C-alpha cells in the first residue's frame, strides 16, 4: 500500500484509518490523508491586538492583507484598519472609517481596486448594521445604495471573477424569530442586487469561497448555524442557482470557521470553528481540504490551537495560506500562522 495507507488486509485492501487509501498525491498519517510535508507554521510577527470575528481580505492591487474591526478580549468592538505587507503589520489611520464592529464581512473587488465591507454589529444586544463601505487603500467611503441587504451579522462575502461581482450569502438579522437568512446578493459598482431567495437553508456563520476547480468555477459555501442547529452541508453557486454538492465525507457541523482556496494544493482549506458562539461551545483545531467530491481531514505536525472567528486568506506573494486571530471561549488570539 505504501504511504497512501496505514492498513492492508490479507485480501489486498488498503485503507487510511477508516477510509479508503489516499489518492491525489496525499499520504496517510495518523489515520488521515494529508499532503506530504504539509504543516502549519507559526510566523513570529508583531500582530494586531488579538481580535475575533474580524474580517480580512487580500488586496491584489496593493499586495497586502487588509484587516478591519473585530471583537477584543474584553468584548469591545474595534474600528482599527490594519494591513499586512512584506514588511509586516501596519496600523492604518484613514481620515474616514466605518464605526467599530464585529461579525461583519469584507470582500475585494479587483476591477475597481476596492475592499467592500457590509454589516456586523457593535455589541451583543445592539441593532445589527446594514451599512456598506469601500476602502481604496487610503480611506474608507460609505456608499448608500438605493437597495441593499437587510442589516445583519454572520453573513459571508466573496468575489466571483466570472461574473465580476461580490457575492453575499446568509447571516442573521435582529428579531426573536425568523432571524436566520438564506438570501443571496451581488454587489458591483456601488449597487446591490438580490440574486436568489432560495438555496441552502437560512444560516449564519458559515463560510464562502471561490473554487476555480469546481465545474469551471463556483462559489462554495459550507456549514453554519441555522434553525435546525449546526450544518455540515456543502453547496455551490453558479451565478443563477445553488446546488447541493454530494460529498463522500464531511467535517462535522460547525460555525464561525473560515475557508480559503489553496492554489498550491488546488483545493479549498477549512480550519477551526465551534458548535456555537458562546464560551460554552466546543471549539476545534481541525484542518480539512475539499477536492470537489470529498472533504479530507489533514493531520499536520503543527497547528493553530482550537478557535473560531479567525481570518484565513491566501497570500500570493509568499505562496502561503495566512491565518490570524480568533477566540476559544476564554482567550482572544493575536498569533499568526501559515500553511
Image (cartoon, rainbow, N blue to C red):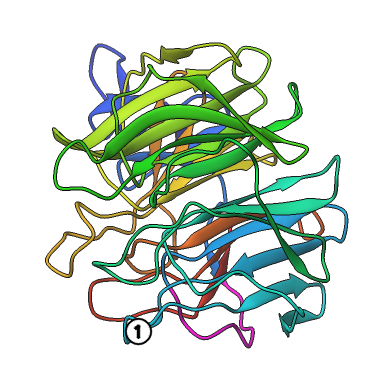
> Residue placed at 71% from the left, 63% from the top?
65
- Residue 85 lies, with reference to residue 10, above or below; the image says below
Does residue 8 appear left or right of residue 217 in this picture?
left
Q: Quadrant of residue 137?
A: bottom right
Give the percent coordinates (x, y) of residue 273. 32, 54
Say if residue 15 shows up in the picture: no
**Secondary structure predominantly adopted by residues drawn in magenta:** loop
- Image quarter where the N terminus lies is top left
Does residue 185 appear left or right of residue 206 in this picture?
right
- Residue 292 lies, with reference to residue 325, above or below; the image says above
> Residue placed at 32% from the left, 87% from the top?
74
Residue 44: say if magenta: yes
Q: Nearer the viewer, residue 22 or 161?
A: 161
> Residue placed at 73% from the left, 41% from the top?
190
Tell me the residue that label 1 is attached to: 73
Residue 148: say if magenta: no
Give the percent coordinates (x, y) of residue 123. 32, 72
The magenta segment:
42-51
Amino acid at each position: 500500500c505504501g504511504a497512501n495507507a496505514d492498513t492492508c488486509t490479507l485480501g489486498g485492501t488498503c485503507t487510511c484509518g477508516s477510509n479508503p487509501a489516499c489518492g491525489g498525491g496525499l499520504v496517510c498519517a495518523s489515520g488521515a490523508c494529508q499532503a506530504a510535508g504539509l504543516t502549519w507554521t507559526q510566523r513570529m510577527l508583531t500582530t494586531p491586538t488579538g481580535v475575533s470575528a474580524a474580517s480580512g481580505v487580500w488586496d491584489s492591487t496593493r499586495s497586502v492583507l487588509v484587516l478591519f474591526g473585530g471583537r477584543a478580549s474584553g468584548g469591545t468592538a474595534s474600528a482599527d484598519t490594519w494591513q499586512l505587507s512584506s514588511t509586516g503589520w501596519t496600523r492604518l489611520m484613514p481620515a474616514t472609517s466605518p464605526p467599530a464592529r464585529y461579525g461583519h464581512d469584507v470582500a475585494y473587488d479587483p476591477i475597481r481596486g476596492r475592499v467592500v465591507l457590509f454589516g456586523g454589529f457593535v455589541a451583543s444586544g445592539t441593532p445589527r448594521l446594514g451599512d456598506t463601505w469601500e476602502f481604496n487603500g487610503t480611506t474608507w467611503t460609505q456608499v448608500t445604495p438605493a437597495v441593499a441587504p437587510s442589516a445583519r451579522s454572520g453573513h459571508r462575502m466573496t468575489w466571483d471573477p466570472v461574473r465580476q461581482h461580490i457575492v453575499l450569502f446568509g447571516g442573521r438579522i435582529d428579531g426573536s424569530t425568523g432571524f436566520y437568512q438564506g438570501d443571496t446578493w451581488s454587489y458591483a459598482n456601488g449597487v446591490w442586487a438580490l440574486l436568489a431567495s432560495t438555496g441552502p437553508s437560512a444560516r449564519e456563520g458559515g463560510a464562502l469561497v471561490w473554487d476555480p476547480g469546481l465545474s469551471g468555477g463556483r462559489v462554495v459555501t459550507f456549514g453554519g448555524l441555522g434553525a435546525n442547529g449546526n450544518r455540515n452541508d456543502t453547496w455551490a453557486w453558479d451565478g443563477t442557482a445553488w446546488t447541493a454538492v454530494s460529498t463522500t465525507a464531511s467535517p462535522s457541523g460547525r460555525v464561525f470557521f473560515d475557508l480559503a482556496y489553496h492554489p498550491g494544493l488546488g483545493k479549498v482549506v477549512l480550519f477551526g470553528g465551534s458548535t456555537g458562539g458562546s464560551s460554552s461551545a466546543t471549539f476545534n483545531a481541525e484542518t480539512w481540504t475539499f477536492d470537489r467530491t470529498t472533504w479530507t481531514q489533514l493531520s499536520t505536525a503543527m497547528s493553530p490551537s482550537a478557535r473560531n472567528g479567525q481570518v484565513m486568506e491566501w497570500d500570493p506573494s509568499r505562496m502561503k495560506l495566512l491565518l490570524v486571530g480568533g477566540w476559544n471561549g476564554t482567550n482572544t488570539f493575536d498569533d499568526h500562522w501559515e500553511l
